[in-house]
Image: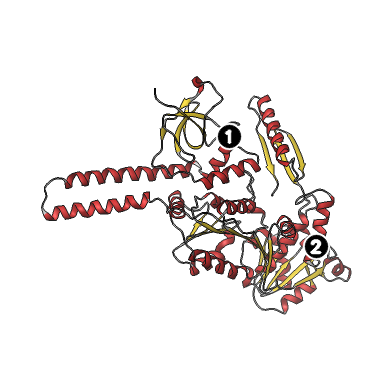
Amino acid sequence: MEECHYIQVAVPLRLAWVPCYRSCVPLSPGRRVTVPVASRRYVGVVLRSVTDPGLPASRIQNIISVEEDLPDISPEELKFWEFLSNYYLCTIGEVYKAAYPSGKIRSEQTAADILARLRSRLAIREEALTRKHKDSVRERLEAERDDIASRIEALTRIPDASPAKPAAPRPVLLVGGGRTREYISMCRSVIAKGLNVLVLIPEIAASEQLEAVFDEEFPGVTHRVNSHITDARRRSVAADVRKFGGQIVLGTRSSLFLPFSRLGLIIVEQEQDVFFKQTEPAPRYNARDAAVMLARIHGAAVVLGTPAPSLESLHNAQTGKYELRRTGPELPAMTLIDINAERRKNGMQGRLSRKLIDAVANTSGPVALIRGWEKPDELLDVADKWLPGRVVDILTLPEARLKDLGGYALVAVVQADALMNADDFRADEHALQAIAMLRESCRGVFVVQTAKSDHPVFGEPSEVYARLLEERARFSLPPYTRLVDTQCGSRRERIVLKPDGTLQARKNTILEEARQLEQSSKGRLRTTIDVDPI
């Protein structure tokens, strides 16, 4: 009688359970298999073998096939997926779908088809060489055979065994300007050891300067991974970091799911940026915190760079989880203009103060005005009247944060109050970080107009951070707690979790309650769960 092996398989679906299948051969975790789910077929990943499936044998289906030509999922990838599933309260299938979307799997299957055709062509050449030929024909066949064989070898090369992974060093929080020089130095050291580097950026448009520097410093080994590249290019990068060391990947949050085999360093540039948060679909993870866990799994170093740190990272540094390092140069000086005081002495010309107009007059070169609630035409009319002959660009804050402001003689935030949304408990933190980002990008004069000049956010940064952390602790807000936002239909609920021994148990209870709600609605409702950063 043929021996049966039971395996649990992750499929790219939102299932409340992990399907179990039967295989006639033992399969190790990470192998790719095609399995039936309802009336469809999916390429799944073996998670583990089980001796007792907990189901009658008659209800367990056989796998359809083992995908020999698709690359295995590494143990590090599986461990990372399980972390995301457990912490962010989603299914392993949702994580698998995020890591290997349908386009990526199709691309892998295309590569597998190419490999099959190459093997067929190789077999034809080898069979032809068993017969008698003229010397010229034999030489041509041998050359074709060797070329095909080398292409097959390149596609199927197994990575050299990686050395035992050391314990990951403590994450470094790098605060201040001049970070790029530090990054280059760290990358050189890691590349020299034959290890790979992952540089995470919050957005594609914000990376042009960084990309130019890495292309110049590390030509030929710097790869971009973002939504703009093709599936074939992504597959090529994945193959490189799976098989080789000495590669640098500069990418957005999805690059966390690349199959790194020799990961030595992760750099998270602008770690405080809100765009590192994945909101839709699940897993709703924060790429900054996920990067710290990925580095721990690989035994890699991780550096979180920022002009103004997130409260979560700063708190981790203060409690000893992270190492805090400061780098220079200092941010450019900020000139603060009180709009209310200027109005009282008739010092406002529309939306621009006389002080700002005088500051522009004392500079030469283009000017950037960053608007809040103001309309662009309104600001342009004022600029045309009071700044005649000057090149003035009107930018929103999102536009400014993606732009290199170094070419402007003066950068001014026309109404900084627009940065402070009273309905968001993170508003002051985000305002402080936004101003720091603008100051870092500006190489000329930096001016801020505000009707709240006495607002604490404009004070000494160390004092501002101390006040914000004290407020968060007093009102039981992150980073001292975790917030879990749940939504099922029209029902919304925010749950505060304290990071003590009951944290994971309470999260599991939330997940079970969500599943019960879905079952009671007979599939009409889906529960969305969003967990605050670590």
Residue drawn 59% across the image and 42% down it = 82
Image position, residue 460 (x, y; %): 80, 67
> What residue type is disc 1 on?
Arg
How many callouts does the rendering have? 2
Asked whether 226 or 87 is in front, the reply is 87
Residues marked 1 and 2 touching at CB (< 8 Å): no
Asked whether 350 or 404 is in front, the reply is 404
Image position, residue 226 (x, y; %): 53, 53
Give the crowd class for mark 2: few <14, some 14-19, many >=20 residues within 10 Å.
some
**Mark sitting on residue 464:** 2
Q: Is residue 489 visible?
A: yes
Secondary structure beneath label 1: loop
Image position, residue 429 (x, y; %): 75, 57
Residue drawn 76% across the image and 44% down it = 500
Alpha carbon separation for disc pair 1 and 2: 43 Å
Which numbered disc flags the more N-terminal residue, 1 or 2? 1
Q: Quadrant of residue 84?
A: top right
Asked whether 63 or 159 is in front, the reply is 159
Is 354 situated above or below 515?
Answer: below
Asked whether 164 or 499 is in front, the reply is 164
Q: Is residue 93 rendered to the left or right of residue 378?
A: left
Q: Which residue is mark 1?
A: 14
Secondary structure beneath label 2: helix
Give the crowd class for mark 1: few <14, some 14-19, many >=20 residues within 10 Å.
some
**Mark sitting on residue 501:** none
Q: Is residue 64 rendered to the left or right of residue 341?
A: left
Q: Is residue 281 visible?
A: no
